[in-house]
Amino acid sequence: MNGSEKFCISLLQNCKNLRQIKQIQAFICKIGLETDPLIAGKLILNCAVLIPDSLDYACRLLFNVRHPDSFMYNALIRGLSESDAPQNSLCTFKEMCRESISPDSFSFAFAIKAAANLRALEAGIQLHCQALVLGFDTHLFVGTTLTSMYGECGCIEYARKVFEEIPEPNVVAWNAMLSACFRCGEVVFAKKVFNRMPTWDLTSWNVMLAGYAKAGELQLAKEVFEKMPIKDDISWSTMISGFVPNGDFEDAFGFFRELRKLGLTPNEVSLTSVLSACAQAGAFEFGRILHGFVEKAGFGWMVSVSNALLDTYAKCGNLSMAKLVFERMPEKTSVISWTTMIAGLAMHGCGMEATQLFNEMENCGIKPDAVTFVSLLYACSHAGLVEQGREYFNKMTTFYGIEPSIEHYGCMVDLYGRAGLLQRAYDFVCQLPFKPCATIWRVLLGACSVHGNVELAEKVKFRLLELDPSDSGDHILLSNLYAISGKWKASAAVRGSLSSLGINKETGWSMIEVDKIMYTFVAGGEQNEITNQAYEKLREIMLRIRIEDGYIAETNHVLYDVEDEEKEEVVSRHSEKLAVAFGMARLSKGSVIRIVKNLRICGDCHTLMKFISKAYSLEIVLFLSLDTEASDHIQDSVSPMLWFSEIQCNTKALDLRGLRLILGTLMLNPIPDLLSPQKLFSSWSSSVILAVRLDVYRFTTFCLDGKLLPFLS
């Protein structure tokens, strides 16, 4: 190697971006070394592996080399295998073979890795056979990659056989086998492999942590974590991220606090995971503290962290802060950022604003993905924008070429169902290009229940019994519908079938954050100091709103044919009532009360929340854990995105279509034709309308100048 070559290689080793690569290449051409195989290989390696966003340039470099060798091809195969399009790595491997350049062990290892990333089992087997013929299958690097590939494809027996044929597996090979076990769900076998390992490195421990966490074996994960001789940021982030999908939010918060107490700096995964826990648990205060840490520690530039913050504020009911985070993002080039903001607007009932943001997203040149359209259709569904939703669904397939998934079809069924177009929703389901799954029918059953269509609900329930007879929610929903319709015998028969089928009804619970601690209340749970305090406060609240505000319990959703007094007692034990009462007893005056629950709120609880909100001037936010679809926002104030919304109108120029249009701009569903405008406004020349929604499907009351008009859909 002469001096010029050494100098060029030194330049390439210190190169940091594509602009510098091009400058160095120009210098190489100037001194006549562009045909040097060593220099050309290093150039391609830098572009393919070391410099981000320069793979296309690496491909052009290889194309311009007259006689490329295996090193150049290997560099490109390696870079492509780790890219967003691993299939191009396999194409490059095939081209290498067609050019009569013999692949070596590295060629096979990189190509097999591409097959693993694609989970392309057939391609992986073909590469395995070719490596076997050429004698590379027992090479340590190839054998390790084959073990990983079979693990990714769910073939644990193949992975085990390949691993056992490696002559002297090192710790990397053992770790590959360990990972394969967990990917294939072989938790017990993974423990045996771990115990057989001659030595463990930090990766071995982290693989065990991640494997147990993903399998839901959190206690075992904790035991492994305690035994670890050394822990790095991956260890901590693995534990924190493992708790969140399993709903153990308090443990996630606890581990994050411990991480900070030890003086360690959380990484990107830790922050996004703990923010996700805040979003799902409704832990607004803890999320706000994390936001301060993010800004102070300089993590605000990370797109994933900003997206997690945005999602946290939206799900905790603070849409204004979510908008602020979105506006202050250093760059909005990620489709995830736009999708998260659209989802947040949809969650708060701001359907029109969500569609406007989608249009802005298109104007900025950001291509929406399948998840974006799920959020957009969801927004249209909750805002009653039926025709717009249908147009977006068609645009998704015809203009963007996105194949609709179950989620998209489910949103369309929900769109029609919420608008009361039940027959249209039923026809849509029957015309799906595949056999409708239980989830699709379940959406329609919910709409039937809300609109009181017993006949169609029975048809839908028959389909559900064929697909998923063990789901308690379907039985309860139909029983509820029968009870509301006064068909007590039919209701009792459905509930009786739960016992005969051995199906248990899911217990309802609600969580509230007080002083950065999450408290959980269970419907009809055991008495203790916390629940006693909640019951005492609830009795005080009930007494006040009954005497001063005329609150009367809604018992029509109680599914037992018993006296009204007994029904009142049943609904008084609901967990969300206890959580709200506890929050009012413990939180400072004026605090926002945020409740997370696992089941939908009943009509009486919703009515009670509205009475409490008005009587005590409180803002109450309720939403389902891991299900943003049922997010409710209750506040006694003037705001188009909240449950209580005031609008000024001139009744002389108002007809029913005008009323629908006004209510549509408030993100509320259009009212049915049961109430004529003449009847509604017979004695009012100019009024303030207070629209009160019982749930996401219908209105229950109009209040004109302080007078209530009953209105049931």
Image (cartoon, rainbow, N blue to C red):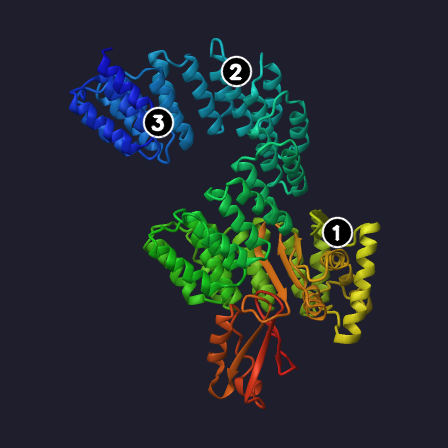
Q: Tell me the tag on residue 522.
A: 1
Q: Position of residue 111 (x, y in %)?
A: 35, 24
Q: Amino acid at mark 3?
A: Val
Badge 1 marks a residue whose secondary structure is: strand
Q: Residue at horizontal 51%, vertical 86%?
A: 651
Query: In the rendered structure, which disc, 3 or 1, sits on the residue that comes first in sequence?
Result: 3
Q: Tell me the tag on residue 171.
A: 2
Q: Position of residue 387 (x, y in %)?
A: 41, 67
Q: Nearer the viewer, residue 436 or 378?
A: 378
Q: Nearer the viewer, residue 343 or 616?
A: 616
Q: Amino acid at mark 1?
A: Val
Quadrant where the C terminus is found in the figure:
bottom right
Query: In the rendered structure, which disc, 1 or 2, sits on the residue that comes first in sequence?
Result: 2
Q: Amino acid at mark 2?
A: Val
- Asked if residue 394 can be seen in this view, the reply is yes
Q: Residue at horizontal 68%, vertical 42%?
A: 250
Q: Tell me the tag on residue 49.
A: 3
In the image, residue 507 sits, relative to residue 82, either above or below, namely: below
The residue mark sitting in front, 1 or 2, is: 2
Circle 2 crowding by C-alpha within 10 Å: few under 14, some 14–19, many from 20: some
Q: Nearer the viewer, residue 16 or 113?
A: 16
